[in-house]
Amino acid sequence: MNTLAASAVAPVLYCGSSDRLVNFWEGDHHLVHGGVLRGHKKVVFCHTAVGTLLLRGSANNTIFDGLC
């Protein structure tokens, strides 16, 4: 795990890692794995949730965006 980010508008926690994936967990009181965001070709170094948008960047100099 390299990064963690929480959404301010939904009960979601995001985790970026060296396997090029961003996993996310959903839930108000108990977190349940919600899925995986793919697309980076190298390590995910950063991501942030801004409103309903999740921005994520990796070592291959790409930035992806998507809805939280």
Image (cartoon, rainbow, N blue to C red):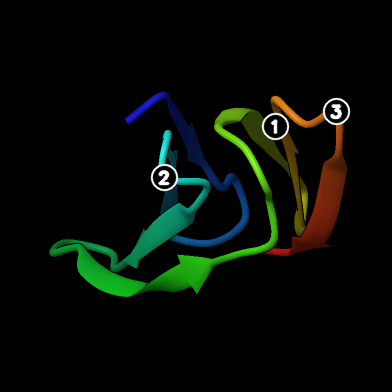
Q: Inspect the image, locate mark 1, and give the three-letter code of the amino acid beneath it.
A: Ser
- Residue 65 visible in the picture: yes
Which residue corresponds to the image point at 67% horizontal and 48% vertical from the top-left? 41
Q: Is residue 40 left or right of residue 28?
A: right
**Disc 1: CA contacts within 10 A as few (<14), some (14-19) or many (>=20):** many
Q: Is residue 28 above or below residue 54?
A: below
Which residue corresponds to the image point at 76% horizontal and 59% vertical from the top-left? 52
**Disc 2: CA contacts within 10 A as few (<14), some (14-19) or many (>=20):** some
Residue 49 is situated, as x and y percent measured from the top left of the image, at 67, 42
Which residue corresponds to the image point at 69% horizontal and 61% vertical from the top-left? 39
Say which of 45 and 47 sits in front: 45
- Residue 12 visible in the picture: no
Mark drawn on residue 58: 1
Mark drawn on residue 19: 2
What is the quadrant of residue 35 in the picture?
bottom left
Which residue corresponds to the image point at 70% horizontal and 25% vertical from the top-left? 59
| Marks 3/2: CA–CA distance | 16 Å
Say which of 28 and 37 sits in front: 37
**CB under 8 Å between discs 3 and 1:** yes
What is the quadrant of residue 28 in the picture?
bottom left
User: Which residue bears the numbered disc 3?
Assistant: 61
The disc, 3 or 2, on the residue closer to the chain's N-terminal end is 2
**Disc 3: CA contacts within 10 A as few (<14), some (14-19) or many (>=20):** few
For the N terminus, which image quadrant? top left
Q: Inspect the image, locate mark 3, and give the three-letter code of the amino acid beneath it.
A: Asn
The disc, 2 or 1, on the residue closer to the chain's N-terminal end is 2
Q: Inspect the image, locate mark 2, and give the three-letter code of the amino acid beneath it.
A: Asp
Q: Is residue 58 above or below residue 68?
A: above
Question: Which residue ends up furthest to the left in the rendered image?
Answer: 30
